[in-house]
Image (cartoon, helix red, strand yellow):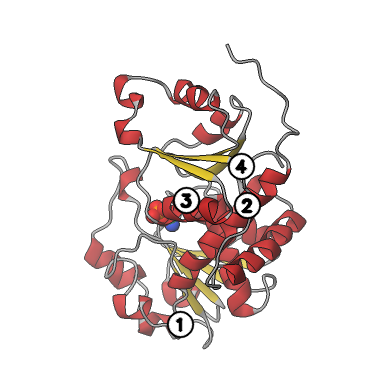
């Protein structure tokens, strides 16, 4: 692959190869010396047009640990503010010969469009409600390490599915790896036609969580609800917020996940989120660095195969 734009484009074997490499980087990241040289001499530019804590920080750390020169574009201070378009901005940076471009953008499809214009490898760090492939990969690695496998598991994804690129990438990845996926949430936050993805849909937590191995909670993404129905937080927590009582419906050894940022007391009880016997939320963050190291390492191996583009 030349780019990492979505789970949509990956095969089962692509996913396994990436997770196996990420496992070795996860071990390296626990050593006193965390450096490797997979990206030595390469330039990585991070362009985040939307807020981020985990993804931006972990892509930066991942690049630095692998020896790349990493530059974070301060998008708030860029000429985007003077009316320069996304593509002109990308072409400007492309002329500086970066090797890896990491892009987050609020519009679905913006990262794919940009990837068609530049001649470096592009990694999608989240585009609108479309895909967040490295999030699904880090979730997969966390599950595989906690459960010892990534197939034939029963996995519940709960909450605001309709606005979630994390849910979309996870449904694609976990489906490709042959797991049973259950989506739980209010019908107003369930995308139309989702059952076509081979998932089961529930609007009752007790029913949907029954005997699942993994419970993945999602934030209410109000920034993407643009004028639509926004549930009251109290009512939402009562019906769909995960707490110790609702978790009793899942398998006794079920793990609790959340991609972050989380809203305590809205989609998840704070005490449960901090319970290291059930919650793997901090492991997800840790695996994020390893997965991003693996993704950039694998793409860097294909650099040089890209056709040269005529810059006008
Ligand atoms: N999970 C995730 O993408 O978090 P950030 O928005 O903080 O990067």
Circle number at residue 153? none
Residue 48 visible to the viewer: yes
Circle 2 is placed at which residue position? 295
Q: Residue at x 62, y 47 (%)?
A: 40
Circle number at residue 278? 1
Look at the numbered discs 1 and 2 and tell me whether their residues touch, using CB distance below 8 Å.
no
User: Mark 2 or mark 3, which has the lower sequence index?
Assistant: 3
Circle 3 is placed at which residue position? 60
User: Which of the two marks, 1 or 2, is nearer to us in this view?
Assistant: 2
Secondary structure category for the residue under label 3: helix
Q: Residue at x 50, y 81 (%)?
A: 250
Quote the CA–CA distance across marks 1 and 2. 28 Å
In the rendered view, tell whether residue 87 sits above or below residue 189. Answer: above
Dot 1 alpha-carbon crowd within 10 angstroms: few under 14, some 14 to 19, many 20 or more:
some
In this view, which residue lies farthest toward the top? 312
Circle 4 is placed at which residue position? 41
Quote the CA–CA distance across marks 4 and 3. 15 Å
């Amino acid at each position: 692959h030349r780019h990492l734009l979505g789970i949509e484009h990956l095969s089962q074997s692509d996913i396994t190869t990436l997770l196996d490499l990420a496992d070795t980087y996860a071990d390296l990241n626990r050593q006193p010396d965390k450096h490797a040289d997979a990206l030595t001499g390469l330039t990585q530019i991070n362009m985040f047009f939307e807020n981020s804590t985990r993804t931006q920080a972990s892509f930066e750390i991942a690049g630095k640990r692998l020896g790349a020169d990493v530059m974070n574009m301060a998008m708030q201070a860029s000429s985007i503010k003077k009316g320069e378009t996304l593509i002109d901005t990308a072409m400007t940076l492309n002329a500086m010969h970066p090797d890896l471009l990491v892009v987050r953008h609020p519009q679905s499809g913006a990262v794919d469009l940009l990837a068609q214009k530049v001649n470096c490898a592009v990694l999608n760090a989240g585009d609108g409600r479309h895909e967040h492939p490295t999030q699904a990969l880090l979730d997969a690695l966390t599950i595989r390490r906690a459960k010892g496998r990534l197939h034939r598991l029963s996995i519940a994804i709960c909450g605001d599915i309709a606005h979630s690129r994390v849910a979309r990438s996870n449904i694609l990845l976990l489906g490709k790896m042959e797991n049973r996926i259950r989506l739980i949430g209010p019908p107003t936050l369930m995308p139309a036609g989702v059952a076509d993805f081979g998932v089961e849909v529930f609007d009752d937590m007790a029913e949907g969580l029954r005997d699942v191995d993994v419970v993945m909670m999602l934030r209410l993404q109000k920034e993407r609800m643009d004028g639509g129905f926004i549930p009251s937080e109290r009512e939402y927590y009562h019906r769909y917020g995960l707490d110790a009582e609702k978790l009793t419906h899942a398998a006794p050894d079920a793990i609790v996940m959340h991609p972050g940022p989380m809203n305590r007391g809205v989609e998840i009880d704070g005490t449960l989120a901090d319970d290291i016997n059930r919650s793997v939320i901090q492991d997800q963050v840790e695996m994020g660095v390893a997965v991003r190291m693996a993704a950039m390492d694998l793409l860097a191996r294909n650099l040089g195969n890209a056709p040269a583009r005529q810059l006008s």
